[in-house]
Amino acid sequence: MESTTWRAEKLTSLLNARMRITISDGRVFVGYFMCIDRGRNTILAAADEFKNEERRFVGLIMIPGNHLVKAEIEAVADGEEDPYM
C-alpha cells in the first residue's frame, strides 16, 4: 500500500465537493471540484461564473493557479437537496 501525505488525502476527500473559487479579476466560479495540480491549476465541473451579479453557466473549466485568490467548500445542510444535482 502506498503512503500518501495528509494533504493528498484531504484533497482526495474533497473530490466532487461543491467549491467556490474567487479569481484575481473578482469573478467567482462555483462548481464540482475535479482535480488540482502542483501549480494550483484547478478543474471544476458543471461550473457557473458570477460577475457583477450576473450568472453564466460555463460547464467544465480550468482555473489557472496564478489567478486563484480564494477557494471555499460549499456545504449543503443535512436533509436539504443540492439544486445542482
Image (cartoon, helix red, strand yellow):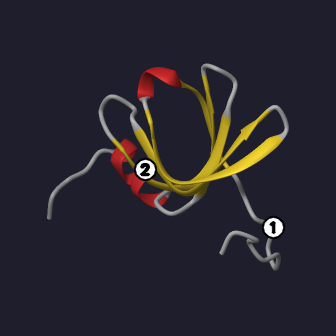
Which residue does the image show at 43% across and 50% down from the upper left? 11
Left-right relation of 69 to 52: left
- Counting residues from the N terminus, which is met first, the one under dot 1 or under dot 2? 2
> Is residue 50 among what the camera can see?
yes
Looking at the picture, tell me which residue is in the foreground, 73 or 63. Answer: 63
Furthest residue toward left: 1
Looking at the picture, tell me which residue is in the foreground, 58 or 78. Answer: 58
Circle number at residue 25: none
Against 53, is 61 above or below? below
Label 1 SS: loop
Residue 84's x, y, as percent?
69, 69
Circle number at residue 11: 2
Say which amino acid is labelled 1.
Ala
Residue 82's x, y, as percent?
74, 71
Against 81, is 52 above or below? above
Which residue does the image show at 33% across and 28% down from the upper left? 39
Distance CA(mark 1)–CA(mark 2): 21 Å
In the picture, which quadrant includes the N terminus?
A: bottom left
> Is residue 19 among what the camera can see?
no
Say which amino acid is labelled 2.
Leu
Residue 20's x, y, as percent?
65, 44
Identify the residue position indicated by label 1 in the image. 77
Label 2 SS: helix
Callouts 1 and 2 close, C-beta under 8 Å: no
Left-right relation of 81 to 8: right
Residue 81's x, y, as percent?
78, 77
Question: Alpha-carbon neighbours of circle 2 within 10 Å: few (<14), some, or many (≥20)?
Answer: few
Looking at the picture, tell me which residue is in the foreground, 60 or 12. Answer: 60
Question: Alpha-carbon neighbours of circle 1 within 10 Å: few (<14), some, or many (≥20)?
Answer: few
In the picture, which quadrant includes the C terminus?
A: bottom right
Which residue does the image show at 76% across and 71% down from the upper left? 83
